[in-house]
Amino acid sequence: MAPIFHLLLLLGLCGNTISKGAPSPTESPDVLHFELPAVNYETKGSPKADPIGVLFRMVHVFLHVVQPHAFPEDTLRKVIQKKFDFSTDYKEVVHYELGLIICVALGLVFVVLMPLVGCCFCMCRCCNNCGGEMHQRQKKNGPFLKKYFAVSLLVICLFISLGIAYGFVANHHIGTRIRSVRKLADSNLKDLRTLLNETPAQIDYMVGQYNTTKEKAFSDLNNIKPLLGGGIHKRLRPKVIPVLDDIKAMAAAMRETKEALESVNNTLKDLKDGAGRLSSSLSSVKSNLERSLNDSACSTPPAAASCRSIRETLDQLDDNTNLGQLPFMNDQLDSVNEVLRTDLAGLVEEGYKSFNDIPEMVQTQTKNIISDVKRVLDSIGSNISNVTKQVPVQDAVSNFNGYVNETERYINHHLPTVEEFELYRWLGGLVVCCLLTLVVIFYYLGLLCGVCGYNKHATPTSRGCVSNTGGIFLMVGVGVSFLFCWILMIIVILTFVVGGNVEKLVCEPYENRKLFQILDTPYLLNENWQYYLSGLIFGKPNIKLTFEQVYSDCKENKGIYTSLQLENHFNLSEYLNIKEHIQDINRELENLNIRLDNIVLLDEEGKKNLKNFSSSGIDRINYTAYLTEASKPPTKVDLSLFADNLEATATNLTQGTLKESLMVNAENIKTIHRQQVIPLEQSMSTLYQSIKILQRTSDGLVVKVSKIIFSLDAAQEFIKNNVSSIIVEESKMYGNTIIGYFEYYLHWVKDSITKKIASCKPMATALDSVVDIVLCNYIIDPMNLFWFGIGKATIFLLPAIIFAVKLAKYYRRMDSEDMYDDVETVPMKNSLGH
């Protein structure tokens, strides 16, 4: 058990290398992912399936028929406790071994009787009895009997041959498997060394990942500005930014309003001046036309009609606007200019800056606290490094390696001896199989010669040489059978007793784990210990630690900590308890005295500026009147069209003063339209657009400003009343994130120790290799197949002897024969003599 203790010590030391910590969540932070170095073991846990396995299972079925009783748990417990008394408890053994005892008894009868029967048979034949007389009575059913004996012997020989084949296969299988034991042992020892070598490497990797965790925590501490400050900023943003955006938009609207008012005043002045000039120009043209129409040419047709039509349209040459009723917006402009003396846009930018400076303020105010937190984290790392240096992990590994090396030396020392004895065993098995093969060859040769040399016309005394040789071969086979079959049966009995009992008492209960359940019986191995394994390892026999549970856990590749319930030796949760350090970190983070009281979104001057803008009077302007006038055309008629019509009318007149005068006036009207009307139309459009801008800005201006001021006051009040709680919440989330890294790290450490580090699968595999593979699969299964095949062949020698003796009478050349079938007559000697 010393190797187990050293491995336990190694695992115990693993626990001491871990810093104290709190239970951690199972969810991994996205930025942290730890994976222990993979450990690959070479040895498989179970033997490979071979075609010969079908034969092994056949033998298992036979053993179950011979020995169908349940595993003798109670008897085995008595034997282990040294309470078994054969004089009183022999009935239990006999009951369990009854089938085997019967088989052994029959075998012993065979061993005793076969030599005696053979001796008696030999002497009986020497006295010309028991078929020894070279005389054959011929009967009508003689040919049938010969065929019957021949076929029966052939079938029996086939069965014997099958048994011999089993023997050869089993004998070869044992030799082959024994030669592979060295490779299997080396593979298991390599896996055990891998376990010992990789465990410290896994521990080093696990401890080293603390630096990765610490670096991530340091990174978050260094980035407190975007993480904590940004978190606070993000929480306040929905309340603050919309208000500042509205104020900024209102500041832009003020500037736009000023520009629109100035545009209205300038455009309105230009329009009034232009309308006066237009009116004067139209009056001049109208007067000129009236004078031209007073010409004498207008009184004679056809010019009279043209002059009359022109005279009727003269009233259309007039100004169409009434711009004089539209007042200038000087008062409103003065009010807006007064409002714009305060730089509202600048005040808003200061509000933005004050709000956006929150992350920078957080970083500035937490500089000293972050240094303290880093110092606490460094101290945890120092504790881990110091403990790791003090733990003699390599000494524990070296000690356990010593036991592995000692085992390897033991195997290397004794295995050549085993292989040498295996050679002798193989030769012995080969001799046994060859003896049976020799017997069955004699029988086959006898059958072959007897059948091939058969002549139905030959009499018993005249049978051919080949047929006679066949009979001799059969009798040689009978003689060899009598000489050696009892020796073969002794070998079968010995191997049957050993192989059958090992299969039923070791291999089968090991496979179904009944053997472990026996060993787990309370107070069995030690009458003072309820559970032997826990008493041996921990000195606490009341802890339920069973061989079956340890073996099952190791088979499932669980860590030794879980398999051996090492929490009873040292509580991993206590070793992984970092509450003290977490409290230090929390205490430092609670000292994050972040103050954001000086955040001012807009001061009183800015609010007053907004109110002054709402009372600037732009909402009281009669925009309808302005828009109505701005929508009118400057003249009552389209002067361009009027001039074209006038010119067309003049063109139809005869050449003269009237025509020339009308043409000149038409050209003057076009000039007026081009130089005065078109600019007026453009100014009217500009006025219309400016009025529209003012109307849009002033629409609900008072309500808009009131809402902005209300929202501003609400946002400022929100910051005042809630910023402290937001800081606390965000600081807690920030601190939990940092602590979460270490909690995750420690949870991973705990999970690795309990499930992955020092996986005891190589130990279960080594045990399987010794019991299930080497003992049961390599030795017992082929041994059982060997005695099964040889025993089967040996048993069939008995009927083979009978039929061979009977059949030989029909193959050998007789010295005398009967003259008539089925009639009692005096035998007549062959003239050739005996």
Image (spheres, grey):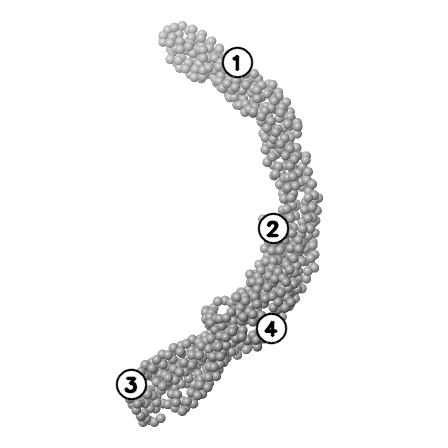
**How many angstroms separate mark 2 from mark 3 (CA)?**
100 Å
Disc nearer the start of the sequence (3/1): 1
Which kind of residue does numbered mark 2 sit on? Pro
Q: Residues within 10 Å of mark 4 (few under 14, many from 20)?
A: few
Q: Secondary structure at mark 2?
A: loop
Q: In the rendered view, tell whether residue 409 sits above or below residue 760.
A: below
Per the image, the residue denoted by label 3 is 457
**How many angstroms separate mark 3 from mark 1 (CA)?**
164 Å
Per the image, the residue denoted by label 4 is 83
Q: Residues within 10 Å of mark 3 (few under 14, many from 20)?
A: few
Q: What number is the disc on residue 357?
A: none
Which kind of residue does numbered mark 1 sit on? Gly
Q: Is residue 745 visible?
A: no
**How many angstroms separate mark 2 from mark 1 (CA)?**
88 Å
Mark 4 or 1: the one toward you: 4
Which kind of residue does numbered mark 4 sit on? Lys
Disc nearer the start of the sequence (2/1): 2
Per the image, the residue denoted by label 1 is 276
**How many angstroms separate mark 3 from mark 4 (CA)?**
76 Å
Q: Nearer the viewer, residue 338 or 102?
A: 102
Q: Secondary structure at mark 3?
A: loop
Q: Is residue 783 left or right of residue 240?
A: left
